[in-house]
Image (spheres, rainbow, N blue to C red):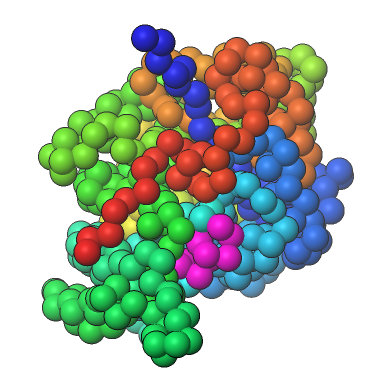
């Protein structure tokens, strides 16, 4: 009996006017598009024409500390609160999934559960929540704290947070409404289940006012690659975004994370792994490299160094010469996995600080692939077929140009190889990803 052929999944990671840190300075880019809803709407519609599983919006909370004259040189990548933005996009798109980052550190779980349940209903079952724990002191200070909560505690709290949110999503049940004018019953009281939770971090008794989300639960997404992050993902996530530089590293992460699922009683296909990739396309490899070098030439050294410092947990790099060997760096309480990625990259390739920030400027630690559509498709196919990925989170270097290049050049090549859909067959994000609708806990 023939089995359905495995196909890859694609997310379109939309950020400002492109993921390259100097994208806004490119002569073909209008930087004001980052602040215009109409431009973002067209990017989402372009991704939908390309049959992407989902668009994804990351988020941080506020502006990092630093000298104003330096901060003024960097584009602000998260101009809109992502759930508000996705609620608008829900009405301007039809099939594509809608994934937003919301931190468990600074929003009560009731608020998050209600907001994502509403988005799932308004979009017809296309919502996804990218769970982060917030890893910077400047975000903590925006909420009245002196510094961030320790890494292990943040992830322990996040695990309980997910349990609370799921309990709230289950609180009113599927199809609870009766609207029975004769009996006077608006809804079926048997389907109302208050969540009575008493845990280490949360104590509440509550129920949501809306029916269970169309997907049961919006798709749960996670992006942490530290040991704590992987354990949280193995227990709760259905989609994982990750940054990996080499095929061997991606294979180790992929297989290790899938192995962890068994300890939580979950099958290996219950979770999809999508490494990030920044594709730079040209009619020839030489043309693609010329396009990439043009972007690299626009990097302001102060911004490149500031970006790398932030990715390393606000490590002060100004005391080191830019062209000196990369210094010893510890992870601290910030983004453990991303710090380790850059330390490993610098050691493996014997890079200086300047060379590392130049590597970070394009995709912030995600893999950069430069070449023709065939070459990019070859790279994606290799990772997909060799147990390194279930698909990819695509980071366009500039928007909308880089996304349009991918949709018009790489997507047809992937379709020709039988690696990607030629039409949507489902309507919900779970259906796009081949994930079952989870039953209610009641």
Q: Is residue 356 visible from the viewing direction of this image?
A: no
Residue 340 spot, x, y in % from top left: 34, 41
**Image height of 65 relative to 16, above or below:** below
Q: Nearer the viewer, residue 271 or 296?
A: 271
Q: For this view, does 311 lie left or right of residue 226?
A: right
Residue at (78%, 39%) from the top-left corner? 401
Q: Is residue 321 magenta?
A: no
Task: State whether residue 333 is above or below residue 432.
Answer: below
Which residue is drawn at the image coordinates 43% and 63% (left, top)? 213
Residue nearest the viewer, comparing 70 with 178: 178
Instruction: Report the magenta residues as a range.
Output: 116-124
Q: Position of residue 337 (x, y in %)?
A: 33, 44
Taking 169 as reference, is 425 left or right? right
Residue at (14% x, 74% y) in the render: 199
In the orientation shown, which residue stands out farthest toward the bottom?
184
Q: Looking at the figure, which quarter contains the C terminus?
A: bottom left
Q: Is residue 117 magenta?
A: yes
Q: Which residue appears at 48% of the width and 41% of the height?
A: 431
Which quadrant is the N terminus positioned in? top left
Where is residue 66 drawn, in percent x and y?
A: 55, 69
Q: Estimate the x, y position of residue 253 in percent, counting from the top left.
A: 31, 31
From what the image shows, is residue 256 above or below residue 312?
Answer: above
Depth order, front residue of 226/124: 124
Helix, strand or loop for the magenta stretch, by majority = helix
Res. 442 visible in picture? yes
Looking at this rendering, what residue extends furthest in the right direction?
27
């Amino acid at each position: 009996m023939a089995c359905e052929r495995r196909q890859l999944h694609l997310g379109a990671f939309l950020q400002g006017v492109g993921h390259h840190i100097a994208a806004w300075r490119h002569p073909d880019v209008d930087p004001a598009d980052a602040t215009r809803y109409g431009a973002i709407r067209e990017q989402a519609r372009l991704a939908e024409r390309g049959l992407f599983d989902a668009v994804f919006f990351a988020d941080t909370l506020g502006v990092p500390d630093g000298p104003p004259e330096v901060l003024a040189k960097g584009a602000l990548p998260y101009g809109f609160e992502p759930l508000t933005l996705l609620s608008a996009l829900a009405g301007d798109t039809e099939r594509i999934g809608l994934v937003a980052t919301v931190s468990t550190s600074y929003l009560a779980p009731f608020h998050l559960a209600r907001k994502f349940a509403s988005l799932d209903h308004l979009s017809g079952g296309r919502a996804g929540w990218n769970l982060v724990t917030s890893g910077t002191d400047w975000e903590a200070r925006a909420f009245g704290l002196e510094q961030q909560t320790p890494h292990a505690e943040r992830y322990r709290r996040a695990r309980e947070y997910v349990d609370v949110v799921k309990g709230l999503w289950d609180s009113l049940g599927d199809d609870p409404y009766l609207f029975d004018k004769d009996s006077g019953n608006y809804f079926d009281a048997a389907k109302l289940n208050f969540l009575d939770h008493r845990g280490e971090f949360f104590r509440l008794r509550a129920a949501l006012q809306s029916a269970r989300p169309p997907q049961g639960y919006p798709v749960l997404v996670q992006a942490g690659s530290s040991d704590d992050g992987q354990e949280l993902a193995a227990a709760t996530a259905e989609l994982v975004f990750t940054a990996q530089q080499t095929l061997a590293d991606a294979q180790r992460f992929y297989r290790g994370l899938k192995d962890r699922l068994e300890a939580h009683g979950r099958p290996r296909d219950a979770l999809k792994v999508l490494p990030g990739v920044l594709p730079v396309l040209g009619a020839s490899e030489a043309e693609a490299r010329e396009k990439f070098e043009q972007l690299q030439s626009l990097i302001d050294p102060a911004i490149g160094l500031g970006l790398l410092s932030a990715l390393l947990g606000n490590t002060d790099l100004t005391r080191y010469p830019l062209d000196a060997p990369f210094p010893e760096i510890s992870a601290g309480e910030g983004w453990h996995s991303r710090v380790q990625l850059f330390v490993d990259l610098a050691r493996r390739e014997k890079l200086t600080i300047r060379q590392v920030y130049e590597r970070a400027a394009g995709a912030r630690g995600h893999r950069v692939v430069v070449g023709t559509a065939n070459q990019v498709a070859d790279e994606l196919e290799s990772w997909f077929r060799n147990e390194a990925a279930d698909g990819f989170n695509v980071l366009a270097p500039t928007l909308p140009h880089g996304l349009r290049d991918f949709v018009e050049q790489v997507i047809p090549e992937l379709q020709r190889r039988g690696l990607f859909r030629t039409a949507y067959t489902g309507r919900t994000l779970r259906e796009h990803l081949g994930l079952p609708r989870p039953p209610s806990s009641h």
